[in-house]
Image (cartoon, rainbow, N blue to C red):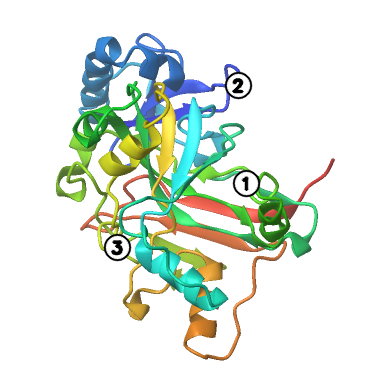
């Protein structure tokens, strides 16, 4: 089933069920008023939500309405926590080579991960705001999962069972604000503005072969102002799968229901697949000694991130965001 949240009813939105074609929806309030409420009581409400999804698909659900992506917030507007990993070693290797740094000995055994802002989380048509283009705004096209409860110290097998929903995320970065923050030796805050998410979050059973229990498979396509930036496959070269990443995150803390974990920038070593962020394209230009043509985002730029099935239909509902100047 596919779930989304309307921008109404409070800061957690209102939970709805969406049909496979992403054209119609139905309120889910009889089962759970919000996504957060559903996740907190998932074993009890998931069955009823699935029945409602089947009724919607069959044209038998009460009070269906046309789906408007602009009316949607993130599927989970306020997360228990938002974690983002770097599951694709090609992206890490390019970054190190571009900086002239050596690769860490633990590259293949110890995942990179940070904790970002868990609210506000943006919807698929929400703007990317910045005060100045000098911030160096960039998009990062990724997949992400939403979890149920996961105990501290849980291993990959239990972590795999905790994955309840899958979606896409634009993990927005302010590239030029990051270095000064990292120099302080205490992580970054300003370098990571609010992220935005696909229209719907999808249960694993809905994805069929596109979900193997550890990785999402399929091309994540990013275009900027209509120009293709990249279409790498999410399932190719994702070194750390979600069960490993979640187990890593849970080493010293429990993960509450409603934890979001991003895959990191999707990256394939095949140059023909392009990139899932502008910084990686700039890194390739530097490493391959190409003409430096790629700039970071400007006001008015529109980033579009999507994944389609074998028939060309959007699976998660595209993220499409315009970069705009913030008005205090």
Q: Is residue 177 left or right of 198 when viewed as pictured?
A: right
Q: What kind of element bears circle 3?
A: loop
**Residue 72 in sight:** yes
Q: Residue furthest left?
A: 209
Q: Position of residue 189 (x, y in %)?
A: 67, 44
Query: Mark 3 sits on what residue?
Result: 233
Q: Is residue 223 above or below residue 72?
A: below
Binning the other alpha carbons within 10 Å of mark 1 as few (below 14), some (14 to 19) or many (20 upward) gives some
Q: Is residue 37 above or below residue 72?
A: above
Q: Is residue 59 above or below residue 194?
A: above
Residue 220 sits in quarter: bottom left
- The residue closer to the viewer here, 298 or 107, is 107
**Residue 28 in sight:** no
In the rendered structure, are the residues bearing label 1 and label 2 in contact, judged by CB atoms less than 8 Å apart?
A: no
Q: Is residue 197 left or right of 221 when viewed as pictured?
A: right
Whole-number angstrom distance, CA of label 1 to CA of label 2 = 27 Å
Q: Position of residue 8 (x, y in %)?
A: 58, 22
Query: Mark 1 sits on what residue?
Result: 187
Query: Residue placed at 51% from the left, 64% from the top?
Result: 277
Circle on res. 54? none
Q: What kind of element bears circle 2?
A: loop
- The residue closer to the viewer here, 62 or 84, is 84
Q: Nearer the viewer, mark 3 or mark 1?
A: 1
- Closer to the chain start, of discs 2 and 3, is 2
Binning the other alpha carbons within 10 Å of mark 3 as few (below 14), some (14 to 19) or many (20 upward) gives some
């Amino acid at each position: 089933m596919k779930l989304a949240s309307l921008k109404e009813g409070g800061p957690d939105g209102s939970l709805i069920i969406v049909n496979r074609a992403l054209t119609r929806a139905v309120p889910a309030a009889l089962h759970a008023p919000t996504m957060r409420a559903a996740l907190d009581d998932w074993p009890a409400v998931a069955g009823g939500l699935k029945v409602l999804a089947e009724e919607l698909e069959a044209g038998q659900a009460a009070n269906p309405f046309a789906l408007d992506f602009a009316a949607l917030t993130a599927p989970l507007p306020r997360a228990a926590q938002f974690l983002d990993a770097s599951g694709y070693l090609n992206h890490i290797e390019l970054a190190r080579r571009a900086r002239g740094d050596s690769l860490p000995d633990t590259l293949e055994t110890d995942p990179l991960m940070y904790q970002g802002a868990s609210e506000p989380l943006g919807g698929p048509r929400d703007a990317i705001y910045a005060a100045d283009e000098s911030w160096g705004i960039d998009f990062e096209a990724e997949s992400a999962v939403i979890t149920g409860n996961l105990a501290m110290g849980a291993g990959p097998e239990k972590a795999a069972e905790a994955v309840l929903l899958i979606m896409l995320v634009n993990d927005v970065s302010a590239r030029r604000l990051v270095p000064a923050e990292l120099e302080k030796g205490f992580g970054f805050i300003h370098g990571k503005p609010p992220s935005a998410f696909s229209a719907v979050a999808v249960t694993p059973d809905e994805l069929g072969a596109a979900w193997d229990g550890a990785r999402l498979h399929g091309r994540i396509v990013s275009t900027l102002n209509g120009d293709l930036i990249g279409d790498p496959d999410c399932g190719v070269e994702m070194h750390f799968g979600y069960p490993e990443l979640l187990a890593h995150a849970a080493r010293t803390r429990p993960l509450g229901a409603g934890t979001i974990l991003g895959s990191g920038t999707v990256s394939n070593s095949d140059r023909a697949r392009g990139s899932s962020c502008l910084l990686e394209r700039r890194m390739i230009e530097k490493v391959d000694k190409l003409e430096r043509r790629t700039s970071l985002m400007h006001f008015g730029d529109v980033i579009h991130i999507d994944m389609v099935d074998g028939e060309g239909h959007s699976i998660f509902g595209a993220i499409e965001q315009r970069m705009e100047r913030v008005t205090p």
